[in-house]
Image (cartoon, rainbow, N blue to C red):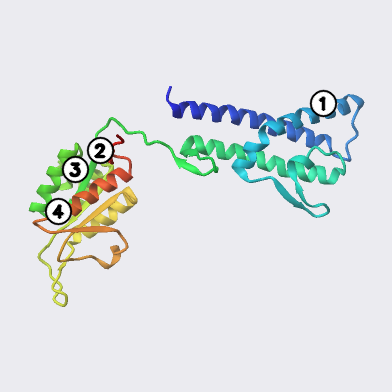
């Protein structure tokens, strides 16, 4: 069993304790209803339950406060008070019930945060989420490549991905089985984990700036890729190509036909950020 599994098991155990505590708090709150007539047996049970909850509060309130920050509250009659101390103080009853209501909410919130921790991460000593160690799949990472045509940049890109052990898909290089070009692009994108859009110099030139326009198919496939992959899209733009106004907010990297080093480094950095590869300095 890994350390992460042990941590998750501890959280599950704590969730069970808090769930039981929450249930007993609700029972105790019902017994405090001033309009409810209690039998002698119920009175004895209420006092026994109160003592039990005081002990549980002593054991659990620290983690509840750490997870939620719920320690003090403001009452309309009592002013600011410590909810865990006031909750089991039987006089006055109005403040007692008010404090119990805050305690119930605090316990419920703590349970929710622990459940979220198991799903999303762990907490540091200050109670802040620390990202869970990434689990790497044994399946090869797959890339979708959008490009304008066969270029030296595309050849270098494909060779680089192969060296990283990353499979790639190019829509027009796959059998279409009767699909239209648009449907073929959509179908190919569903097979990949992320997209690389390679914007190289095409035929169309902006006469005012002297720069080449991005190819229409790159703009279209980039838009589709953002819908499919979200932020897992890498845009590589050849120097001299004018970035389309609709996609200027996307972070991209430039390259030249003789130097793609920065573009290739960009790929590695993003793959590392997304958890597809491990990269970084080894500890000595």
Q: Using the numbered discs, state the Cα–Cα distance from disc 4 to disc 3 in whole angstroms.
A: 21 Å
- Residue 126 pos. (x, y %): 55, 43
The N terminus: image quadrant: top left
Between 181 and 51, the residue placed more toward the observer is 51
User: Residue beneath label 3, please?
Assistant: 169
Local secondary structure at mark 1: helix
Q: Secondary structure at mark 4?
A: loop
Rendered view: 157 above or below 112: below
How many residues crowd around disc 1 within 10 Å: few (fewer than 14), some, or many (20 or more)? Answer: few
Q: Quick one: label 4 or label 2, which is nearer the N terminus?
A: 2
Q: Determine whether 188 is above or below 226 in the image.
A: above
Asked if the residue at tag 3 contacts the one at tag 1, i.e. Cβ–Cβ closer than 8 Å, the answer is: no
Q: Is residue 13 visible?
A: yes
The alpha-carbon separation of the residues under discs 3 and 2 comes to 11 Å
For label 1, the residue is 48
Residue placed most toward the observer, 264 or 222: 264
Question: How far apart in space, not on screen, are marks 1 and 2 (Cα)?
Answer: 59 Å
Residue at coordinates 36% horizontally, 33% vertically from top-left?
Answer: 135
| Residue 137 placement (x, y as % from top left) | 31, 32
* Disc 3 residue crowd, few under 14, some 14–19, many 20+, Cα 10 Å: some
Q: Say which quarter of the image contains residue 159.
A: top left
Q: Which residue bears the numbered disc 2? A: 141
Residue at (74% x, 29% y) in the render: 55
Which label belongs to residue 263? none
Q: Secondary structure at mark 2?
A: loop
């Amino acid at each position: 069993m890994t350390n992460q599994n042990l941590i998750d098991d501890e959280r599950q155990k704590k969730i069970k304790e808090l769930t039981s505590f929450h249930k007993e708090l609700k029972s105790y709150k019902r017994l405090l209803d001033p309009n409810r007539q209690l039998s002698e047996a119920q009175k004895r049970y209420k006092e026994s339950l109160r003592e039990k909850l005081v002990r549980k509060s002593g054991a659990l309130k620290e983690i509840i406060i750490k997870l939620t920050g719920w320690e003090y509250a403001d009452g309309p009659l009592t002013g600011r008070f410590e909810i865990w101390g006031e909750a089991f103080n039987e006089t006055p009853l109005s403040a007692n019930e008010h404090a119990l209501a805050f305690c119930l909410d605090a316990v419920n919130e703590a349970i929710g945060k622990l459940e979220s921790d198991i799903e999303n991460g762990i907490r540091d000593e200050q109670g802040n989420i620390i990202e869970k160690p990434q689990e790497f799949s044994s399946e090869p990472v797959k890339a979708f490549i959008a490009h304008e045509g066969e270029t030296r940049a595309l050849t270098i890109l494909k060779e680089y991905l192969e060296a990283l052990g990353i499979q790639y898909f190019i829509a027009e290089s796959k059998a279409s089985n009767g699909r239209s070009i648009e449907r073929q692009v959509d179908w190919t994108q569903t097979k990949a984990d992320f997209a690389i859009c390679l914007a190289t110099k095409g035929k169309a030139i902006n006469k005012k700036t002297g720069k080449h326009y991005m190819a229409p198919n790159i703009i279209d496939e980039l838009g589709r890729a953002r819908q499919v992959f979200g932020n897992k899209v890498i845009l590589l733009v050849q120097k001299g190509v004018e970035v389309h106004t609709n996609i200027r907010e996307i972070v991209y990297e430039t390259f030249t036909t003789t130097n793609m080093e920065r573009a290739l480094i960009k790929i590695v950095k993003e793959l590392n950020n997304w958890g597809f590869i491990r990269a970084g300095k080894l500890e000595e």
